[in-house]
Amino acid sequence: MKKTFLITLTTLFTLAAASLMAIQYVQMKRTVTVSNNLFNISVNNAMDDMIEQLNRLKVEDYIGQNDRYKLLKFKRIEELNNRMQSIIKENYTTFYDTNIVQVGITMIDSVKLLPGVKISSADSNAIAQYNTILATRDRLTDNSEFYNQFVTDISEYVVDNILTSSSFNFNLLDSLITDKLMINGVDIEPYVGIYDNTDNKFLYCNTEGMEQKLLESPFKYRFHPNGMMSPNEYFIFLQFPLSSLLLKENSTRYFLLAFALISLILTLFFLIMRTILKKDKLDVMKTDFINNMTHEIKTPIATIGLACEMLQDPSIASDPANNSTYIGIISDENRRMRLLIETILQNAKMSNKSFTLNRTTVDINDIIKNVTKSFNLKIESLGGILNIDLTEPSPSLSADELHITNMIYNLIDNAIKYSPEKVNIKITTRKDGDKLLLSIADKGLGISREDQKHIFEKFYRVSTGDVHNVKGFGIGLNYVMQVVNAHGGKISVNSTLGEGSTFTVELPIIN
């Protein structure tokens, strides 16, 4: 799969996911705005209906049963007084002509006819009606101090006094508000307060401690019931415990859920893309490995085949010197193929999780000396230098001798491969507490910072230009790392392009 196509696909998918989240967010904001507007409209409609119904109520609808009876009694007495006053006004000459009747103090004494006075039937009916009403009123008052008491008691039913008294039926307000809200589709029970705007104080709050929040609420409605006198200005405040932001909280929750799902899809997409890229990269590495392996094996096979043909020639086979030369070529090429195959097999074994080391006590200095002997001739033929600086006494390791030997062999072989000019390799060992530090340094091509991140990956090969012009399979350093890890050690590289590389292996020592 082409890299450009993958980048384009990833970019398009990322833009699509980002656009989807942006659309989701805008839609959420729009939904919340519309919902808040509908909520406010529903509350305002409910309160308009409630205020209208409230204004149709009378004073006696707001107070308790005992106070209601008392007020109705006062209103009945006031009505009788008004009727008596009307009779007096309509028959003024009769009631205030002392030659006809004797009138006591108005609204206290009844009207009496003077002895021997004759009056018309209309006057007689007016006097009789007045006395009847007066008698009815006196039965209601029960005592002569009624009028003074009436003036005092009736003042309790002015709005200012009713609202500040415990007799006011505040539950009526709560029930009216709740019913109207339910009718208008608002099923959230609000906090309710009645505020005296003139005296700047709350007269009622159905939940203690909510006064300040009620004052900050946008839901504020003028309160002035019909038939109730008041010099003060009153307001009903509403505050919703979950507020109109309830939908916003739900929308935010849904948006976060959508965001999480989109993020999950995006993450899965990137993981899949990374897997695809790794697979493509691995395919390239495997193809490169096969090509290199084919080339590496093909060369010794061809050489062995050619040597065998030469040995089959009677003129050449009869010469013992030629026989020895060609047999030596066949042996060298056979050893070369065996080493290649052994490297591949050892790497495969190390990748197996069930692999176990055959540990013995080994002398690291002896292993290094034996390995370097096999390279001395090759390095001398290249005009190179191999310096060895080993710590004494020689540290002992609990290790698998075969794998440690192969590890050192691979590191030295790599140092030679990537030193295209004069080979200059230095091998040192030293103790650091209970650790052995083995360093193999060269003055070769060096490794870039980017390649240093991947050199221990299987099949990864450092390029020396536009092509891989250094022979190898890309498994040597991966095998080295697996050997070091299996022995509980660490490996690191310090390299600069054009100046060379130093590989440092840290292994535990037997104390």
Image (cartoon, rainbow, N blue to C red):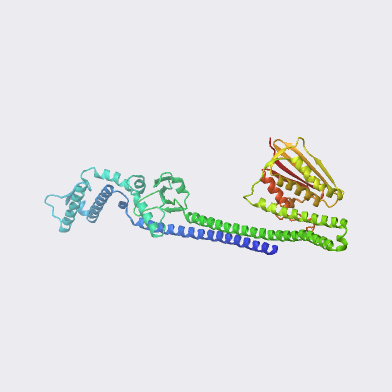
Furthest residue toward left: 116
Left/right placement of residue 119 relative to residue 310 reads left
Left/right placement of residue 214 relative to residue 103 reads right
Front-most of residues 325 and 314 = 314
Name the quadrant containing residue 360.
top right
Front-most of residues 404 and 214 = 404
Front-most of residues 461 and 139 = 461
Q: Residue at x 30, y 51 (%)?
A: 60
Front-most of residues 375 and 168 = 375
Residue 98 visible at all: no
| Quadrant in which the N terminus appears | bottom right
Q: Position of residue 142 (x, y in %)?
A: 20, 45
Residue 176 visible at all: yes
Q: Residue at x 71, y 48 (%)?
A: 480
| Quadrant in which the C terminus appears | top right
Count of marks overlaid on the render: 0
Q: Residue at x 82, y 56 (%)?
A: 327
Q: Position of residue 488 (x, y in %)?
A: 66, 43
Q: Position of residue 296 (x, y in %)?
A: 77, 58
